Image (cartoon, helix red, strand yellow):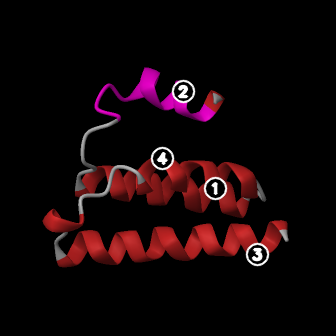
Amino acid sequence: MPVLKDLTQRDSAVGAAATLDELRRFGSDMRGLLEQGQFQAVIDRHKVINGRVDARSLTAEATAELTEIERMATQAEVAIE
């Protein structure tokens, strides 16, 4: 799992609930990967952030960012298929 290893080295908070700033960062990273055609990397990033979302603490802004993240993951899955 090179992606997870990379994330744990860059972000010691992996495993904790994602913050709005982290959702934005993941969204931005995923957007860049999607534009580069790195569809599996988009899906891998989605799996990492999706596992860190605490639905009880989502604000409207976080929900909007998460919706965009979900859309990009779906787009990557469709591109792979």
Q: Earlier in the sequence, mark 2 or mark 3?
A: 2
Q: Callout 3 environment at 10 Å: few (<14), some (14 to 19), or many (20+)? A: few
| Real-space Cα separation, disc 4 to disc 1, in angstroms | 10 Å
| Real-space Cα separation, disc 3 to disc 4, in angstroms | 19 Å
* Residue at numbered disc 4: 48
Task: Using the image, tell me which numbered label, if any, was put on residue 78.
Answer: 3
Residue 26: x and y in percent read: 45, 52
Q: Secondary structure at mark 2?
A: helix
| Real-space Cα separation, disc 1 to disc 3, in angstroms | 12 Å
| Real-space Cα separation, disc 2 to disc 3, in angstroms | 25 Å
Q: Secondary structure at mark 4?
A: helix
Left or right of residue 28: residue 25 = left
Q: Residue at x 76, y 75 (%)?
A: 78
Q: Earlier in the sequence, mark 2 or mark 1?
A: 2
Of the two numbered discs 4 and 1 in the rendering, the one whose residue sits closer to the viewer? 4
* Residue at numbered disc 2: 6
